[in-house]
Image (cartoon, rainbow, N blue to C red):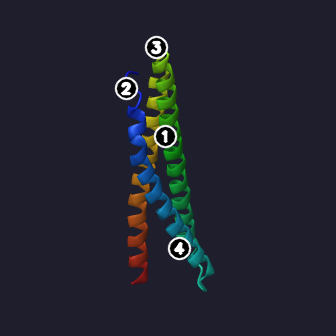
Amino acid sequence: MENWYLPATIIPGIGLLILSTSNLLVNLSTEIKTLITEDIIKEQLIERKLRQLKLLNSAMVFLYIAVASFVISALVSGIYKSIDTDFNATIYITIAGITSALLGLIALIIYSFRAVKIRQDQYHNKF
């Protein structure tokens, strides 16, 4: 890989995704805690939100793996570039990072659709 720094340039974008996802995770966790402490426990709603929490956690893990892959890819590529060796494993590490980032994004998309559906159901059940 000639441009060893390319994988490292993607890391700040994924970092922002991790930041926003962790904020979602904290807010959802707080909401679940509030639902559990209410007088009327809505088990079905809590179960749906716990599945959402698990989905967010999966997205975070995929994004962490993507960052780790990009860091390793840039590091290995930079090292082998400096000693003038043709080492193609960094391409596979970068592809693993891209795949992991895509899986994390897919999990976030699923989370978003389900979150809207849960809110709609909460609204319809209230009236």
How packed mark 3 is, by other alpha carbons closer than 10 Å (few <14, some 14-19, many 20 or more), is few
How packed mark 2 is, by other alpha carbons closer than 10 Å (few <14, some 14-19, many 20 or more), is few
Residue for point 50% across, 16% down: 83
Q: Secondary structure at mark 4?
A: helix
Amino acid type for the residue under numbered disc 2? Asn
Are circles 1 and 4 on residues that touch, CB within 8 Å?
no
Q: Determine which residue is flagged by label 3.
A: 84
Amino acid type for the residue under numbered disc 1? Ala
Residue for point 53% across, 41% down: 65
Amino acid type for the residue under numbered disc 4? Glu
Closer to the camera in the image, 96 or 76: 76
- Whichever of callouts 1 and 4 sits on the residue coming sooner in the sequence is 4
> Between marks 3 and 4, how big is the CA–CA gap?
54 Å
Counting from the top left corner in percent of width and height, residue 40 is at 59, 84
In-image side of 37 versus 85 (left or right)? right
- Whichever of callouts 3 and 2 sits on the residue coming sooner in the sequence is 2
Which circle marks residue 66 in the picture? Answer: 1
Q: Determine which residue is flagged by label 4.
A: 31
How packed mark 4 is, by other alpha carbons closer than 10 Å (few <14, some 14-19, many 20 or more), is few
Instruction: Give the mark count.
Output: 4
Which circle marks residue 28 in the picture? Answer: none
Q: Is residue 107 above or below residue 48?
A: above
